[in-house]
């Protein structure tokens, strides 16, 4: 028999220091930033939600199926993705009652104790849906029904939630093959919510991407260029980037296995590209091509003003069996050791001192914070550090990021916070966690007399609001 659900309570001092004097300072700082508008400059929410403005289907479709943070934990405990209703690689799904999937999730919610997912989800349950008992097997149906009833109300439509969450702007992420029809529909609708895209060209830049050959053909079709010719291929990128910018995009995003860059001469680059499009290339060629394309993208950023983001250092789809059955983004990506100093030098030799070029660096390798990333960002005018990302966007990870980058990069060579999420309703929760941790960190510096209180107040607002707007040209 399942245990009755206990009360769900969000403590007002959560994530603040245990030491009383620092906690008091953190409270005061947080009061200045708690209700600031949310700037979400990088993420993966679906623009169709805001274009169509239709009700979300149910609790499982909204909170379970899209969130790989959630189902990777469940999978690690032996729960099959089919039982949760997760889409397979071919687009099909097992015939699963979404209520049954939710009950399975609820019965295992204890697995998330102490994790960021618990912080985010309990925030959603409490603040968005007004639920006041903890999720477990006993409360599963109450949650499912309460959330389902709420989702049918106008106040829970995507555009209404966007306003309720006090979001000023969201950047989604699309490939060059996307015609941005949903972004155009949002613009044509006259709605004043700001949803912009970001240019993510990985499928047509990574020769080892499983869709590269078909993506390249589609790239030719959507651009009208001969993308099998080096010059035509580069023109196609410039054209698509210009279209993205015309639809409001202010950034590009690049998710490569490494941070390697290259600066080949024209003829060497042309010869490398010929090997790539012929299919007669090896792993070294693929890495060199990705490296060259980061430098080419930097050159284009200097021309068109898109802020360039690099998200390197992840071995995607580590679980081969799961990948073949369910496809990408199913929680099986694993961080890699990543180097930046030598890897970025070819790109920085060309563009590192350009005042109009902006490059935001991320890492999944925390060992590089103090050794490589902070010293680089603390020197090159073009570089800024993205926040603790993915496996590290936890309270502990955010604290480590500040602790290890402050000495060399300061606060103002970072870009504040971005949520990088597919889970729309978690956006306020994620930003709230980041604001609380930054206020706790600043409170420590004030208590140690390393910052005056007026400086900490200004910094808290900068980190929560001003820096992301400035860094992403929003």
Image (cartoon, grey):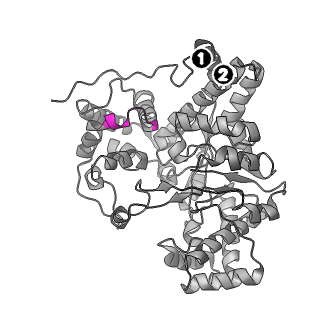
Give the answer, above or below, for where 58 lies relative to 2: below
Q: Is mark 1 on a helix, strand or loop?
A: helix
Q: Does the magenta stretch include residue 110?
A: yes
Front one among 449 and 354: 449
Looking at the image, is 136 positioned above or below residue 293?
Answer: above
Residue labelled with disc 1 = 23
Horizontal placement of 256 versus 4: left or right? Answer: right
Residue 139 in the image: state x and y as whole percent: 26, 30
**Residue 216 circle label:** none
- Whether residue 58 is visible to the viewer of this picture, yes or no, is no
| Mark 1 nearby-residue class (10 Å; few <14, some 14–19, many ≥20) | many
**Horizontal side of residue 24 vs 54, given as left or right:** right
* Coordinates of residue 345 in the picture (x, y in percent): 75, 62
Instruction: Give coordinates of residue 57: x percent, y percent.
Output: 35, 46
User: Disc 2 designates what residue?
Assistant: 443
The location of residue 88, given as percent across then percent down, is 33, 62
Give residue 445's quadrant in the image: top right
Camera sees residue 49:
yes
Q: Magenta residues, as a range?
A: 109-116
**Circles 1, 2 touching at the beta carbon (< 8 Å):** yes
Residue 100 vertical placement versus 250 (above, below): above
Residue plotted at (62% across, 84% down): 228
Please indicate whether residue 218 sits to the left or right of residue 56 in the image: right
The residue that appears at 45% across and 41% down in the rendered structure is 157
Quarter of the rendering containing residue 218: bottom right
> Gap between marks 1 and 2, in whole Å?
7 Å
């Amino acid at each position: 028999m399942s245990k009755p659900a206990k009360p769900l309570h969000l403590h007002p001092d959560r994530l603040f220091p245990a030491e009383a004097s620092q906690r008091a300072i953190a409270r005061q700082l947080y009061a200045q930033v708690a209700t600031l508008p949310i700037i979400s400059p990088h993420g993966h929410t679906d623009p169709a939600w805001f274009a169509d403005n239709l009700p979300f289907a149910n609790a499982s479709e909204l909170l379970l199926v899209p969130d790989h943070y959630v189902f990777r934990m469940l999978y690690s405990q032996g729960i099959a993705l089919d039982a949760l209703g997760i889409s397979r690689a071919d687009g099909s799904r097992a015939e699963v009652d979404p209520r049954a999937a939710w009950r399975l999730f609820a019965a295992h919610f204890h697995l998330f104790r102490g994790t960021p997912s618990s912080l985010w989800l309990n925030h959603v349950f409490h603040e968005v849906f007004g639920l006041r008992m903890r999720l477990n097997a006993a409360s599963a149906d109450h949650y499912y029904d309460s959330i389902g009833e709420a989702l049918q109300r106008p106040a829970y439509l995507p555009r209404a939630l966007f306003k309720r969450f006090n979001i000023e702007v969201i950047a989604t992420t699309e490939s060059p093959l996307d015609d941005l029809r949903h972004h155009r529909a949002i613009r044509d609708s006259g709605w004043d919510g700001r949803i912009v895209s970001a240019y993510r060209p990985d499928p047509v830049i990574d020769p080892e991407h499983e869709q590269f050959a078909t993506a390249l053909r589609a790239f030719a079709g959507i651009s009208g260029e001969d993308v099998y010719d080096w010059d035509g291929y580069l023109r196609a990128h410039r054209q698509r980037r210009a279209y993205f910018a015309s639809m409001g995009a202010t950034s590009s995003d690049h998710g490569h296995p490494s941070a390697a860059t290259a600066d080949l001469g024209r003829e060497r680059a042309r010869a490398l590209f010929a090997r790539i499009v012929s299919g007669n290339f090896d792993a070294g060629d693929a890495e060199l091509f990705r490296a060259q394309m980061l430098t080419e993208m930097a050159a284009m950023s200097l021309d068109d003003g898109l802020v360039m983001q690099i998200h390197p250092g992840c071995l995607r789809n580590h679980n081969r069996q799961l990948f073949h059955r369910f496809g990408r983004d199913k929680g099986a990506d694993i961080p890699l050791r990543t180097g930046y100093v030598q890897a970025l030098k070819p790109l920085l030799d060309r563009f590192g001192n350009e005042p109009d070029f902006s490059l935001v660096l991320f890492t999944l390798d925390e060992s590089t914070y103090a050794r490589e990333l902070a010293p680089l960002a603390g020197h090159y005018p073009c570089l800024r550090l993205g926040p603790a990302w993915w496996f590290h966007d936890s309270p502990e990870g955010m604290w480590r990021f500040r602790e290890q980058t402050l000495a060399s990069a300061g606060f103002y060579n970072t870009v504040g916070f971005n949520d990088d999420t597919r889970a729309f309703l978690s956006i306020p929760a994620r930003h709230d966690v980041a604001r609380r941790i930054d206020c706790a960190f600043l409170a420590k510096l004030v208590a140690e007399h390393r910052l005056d209180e007026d400086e900490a107040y200004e910094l808290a607002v900068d980190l929560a609001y001003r820096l992301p707007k400035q860094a992403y040209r929003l």
